[in-house]
Amino acid sequence: MSTLLEVSGVSVSFDGFKAINNLSFRIGPAELRAIIGPNGAGKTTFMDIVTGKTRPDEGRVIWGERSVSLLRMSESRIAQEGIGRKFQRPTVFEDQSVHDNLLMALKKPRGPFAVLFYRPESPDEARVEELAAEIGLEAALPRKAGELSHGQKQWLEIGMLLAQEPKLLLVDEPAAGMTLSEREHTTDILRRAAETRAVVVVEHDMEFVRRLDCKVTVLHEGSVLAEGTLDHVTQNRQVIDVYLGR
Amino acid sequence: MSVSDPQAGFAQAITRPRHRPFILRNPSVGVFLICLALFTLGVTVLSEDYGLGLISTSFVKTLGKTLCLCLVAIAMDLVWGYCGILSLGHFAFFGLGGYMIGMWLMYARTELIVAASMAEAPIPPTPAEITDAIGSQIFGVVGASDFPVVWMFADSFVLQMLLILAVPGLLALIFGWLAFRSRVTGVYLSILTQAMTLALSLYLFQNDSGLRGNNGLSGLQNLPGVQAPQSLVSIWFLWGSALALALGYLLVAWVVSGKFGSVIRGIRDDEARVRFLGYSVEGYKLFVFTLTAVIAGIAGALYYPQAGIINPAEIAPIASIYLAVWVAIGGRGRIYGAVIGAAFVSLVSTWFTGGQAPSVDLGFYRIDWVDWWLVVLGLAFVLVTLFAPKGIGGLVDLLTWRRHPDRHGADLGPDQGSLREEEAET
């Protein structure tokens, strides 16, 4: 299997506390993966490293067919390379319309001058409407994002990620605070996205992970504890110890 | 959509604001331009030389200067209200623009005077003699007579006019590059910009800075080679300032209307998120910072010929703070708010500090507005920040909201399927 992202031997510590300890992880170009683990297992730090927010003390992060290192790139450069990130708390631009939020995320030149002279053309508008339909917000396009419900904001953020057309999608606890039907919709969106690209979902809701029905990586104290199907890892003695306490 | 398929049809029917022409999408631009044109016409008709003579020349100058302050306030609104960078140093760029035009005005006028006085001499003067004479005229006041390096382009009108754009722009570019690259944000950036304007002001206070120290540049109201009286010149400058304000307003409105506006408002609201969308936040901030510095420079270059004098005290840190106060009181994040704030506060301030405001005698204490105006202004700033964060411009919302609730075409009621705005309007 070819590899899209390979993280190997990465360690990072904050004031002596080892948040990530010799972590290795790899994912292919069209794969859905769930990362689970108790609080403080290093899930969010892992995402910070991949997206360039945190620089690791040691280790390598290799990306794409050309096998470039992500460690020297800025956050915006990494995003342009095709890594999209959804934060735990829905972060959309509340003061702007759903339409403008999606338009801003659309994959287009990102430089200040190109953006200054950019005027949306009909293919772009069509793409925005298509995305809005995909996340179920086509009737809300002219509304301000701040008026949306919590679940709708989560979808809008996922829609913005899809608009970026990333090769890898990092999604941090997408189901937090959602109702049951909203969760089902979210699962659909993520599984559909994973047909054409890699999607990594960080979650600690086991029920949601079961619904995703994909390979699971268990993190504990900054390194990989187990990997496999959900049934496989939940039968793992160490995983049970970590989750249920010894 | 699962439940409300009929709504999809309505969504199609909504005319997106984006497809309409610029002026229709931004009705406030048209309203503003009409108001500005009427104002300029009114002042011209009431002025001494072109009309009825109801407005004194000095008041025409005050109004012209106010237009320049409105222009620099627009720049401040773009950098602070839209992009979220609270720069407390934009008056430095304003002052630099003033210095740049002042150098040409002083040089060219002194050159005419010197040439006229030397023309009587029996032997025609050499160019070097003329230059020396101009030098000792201009710099005699600081005990020097040689032209410093910074004056090397002062004899060329075109080059010196370009410096009005280049000097503030370059300073902003270098300063901004250093600050934004190190990701200095928030209050630290504000402090840094204050330090910049203070340092510049202190430097210019020195006699060997080459710009006549604390004397500054003076006599700027006299245009070289122009015999017309000030009553005419003041109206010309009013026209020029109004034109610059109109163009500046259009430029800023255009910049913030499209996707660029979306991105910089995004930076204001959540910088990290914009970065993860793949936009280089630093590049955008630098662009906005530099553009607004250039606008501020142009505003300064139109202001100081009307004021007649510029000295380093003009770019003291407090001036830039006033600028932020104007924009806050007027309402940031809307361009006309900045204009209203700058015009209102600076005119009221002129009235209070000019000694025209009647003192209030409380019996035990006499309130002299010259002394107490700053207290009132400070109080107004605190009250606006606390109780009316939208500023004076927020009043416009109250008016338009009553007539067209800003529902963006959404349902009028809380539940799906209720009457939509488009239906209700027809």
Image (cartoon, rainbow, N blue to C red):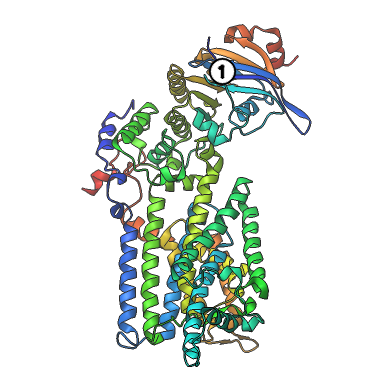
Q: Chain of mark 1?
A: A
The residue identified by callout 1 is A34
Residue drawn at 53 percent across, 21 percent down: A66
SS of the residue under disc 1: strand
- Decide if residue B104 is on the left or right side of residue B146: left
| Relative image position of residue B65 (x, y in whole percent) | 45, 75
Q: Amino acid at mark 1?
A: Ala
Task: Check the image and report above or below for B204 versus B17.
Answer: below
| Relative image position of residue A67 (x, y in whole percent) | 56, 20
Q: Quadrant of the N terminus of chain B?
A: top left
Residue A241 visible at all: yes
Front-lying residue, B104 or B20: B104
Residue drawn at 41 percent across, 85 percent down: B230
Front-lying residue, B226 or B410: B226
Residue B332 visible at all: no
Front-lying residue, B77 or A64: A64
Task: Check the image and report above or below for B115 versus B266.
Answer: below
- Decide if residue B42 is on the left or right side of residue B230: left
Corner quadrant of residue B99:
bottom right
| Relative image position of residue B334 (x, y in whole percent) | 43, 57
- Decide if residue B89 is on the left or right side of residue A17: left
| Relative image position of residue A13 (x, y in whole percent) | 74, 29
